Image: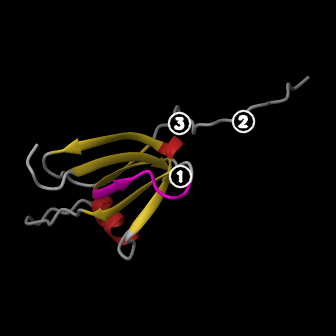
Amino acid sequence: MSSEDPIYRVQFVSNGERYELYVKRLTQGSLFGFVEIGDFVWDTHTSVVVDPSHEKLKTEFADVTSTYVPMHNVLRIDAVKKQGTAKITQLSDKVTAFPGPIYTPKNE
């Protein structure tokens, strides 16, 4: 990796969707159980083709300087050499949020 500041690819789940964002700032955060991400890195499109999920992310995080993601929603964090395209993908119905309910009563 170069001597420049690292770029992190953060993947997490929110509202049944998988978010993939590129950020320059990543800390454990001051809130217990949360990962703080900030300094978002957005792709500058030079072509006519525009990804709608990328534009949705740019709009959603337009005025955000940092955001706190619950640790149990984080899927993966990678330090990458160069940024990719931020995106949102829909999760299948087979994926459940963690943690689930501790006690589920039996139906008799």
**Lower sequence index among marks 3 and 1:** 1
Report the residue marked by disc 1. Answer: 15
Closer to viewer: mark 3 or mark 1: 1
SS at circle 3: loop
Query: Residue shown at 31%/68% (left/top)?
Result: 58
Report the residue marked by disc 2. Answer: 101
Query: Residue shown at 50%/45% (left/top)?
Result: 71
Q: CA distance from mark 1 to mark 2?
A: 17 Å
| Residue interval drawn in magenta | 24-31
Residue 25 belongs to magenta span: yes
Closer to viewer: mark 3 or mark 2: 2
**Lower sequence index among marks 1 and 2:** 1
Q: Position of residue 31 (x, y in %)?
A: 55, 57
Q: Nearer the viewer, residue 68 or 75?
A: 68
Report the residue marked by disc 3. Answer: 93
Q: Quadrant of residue 62?
A: bottom left
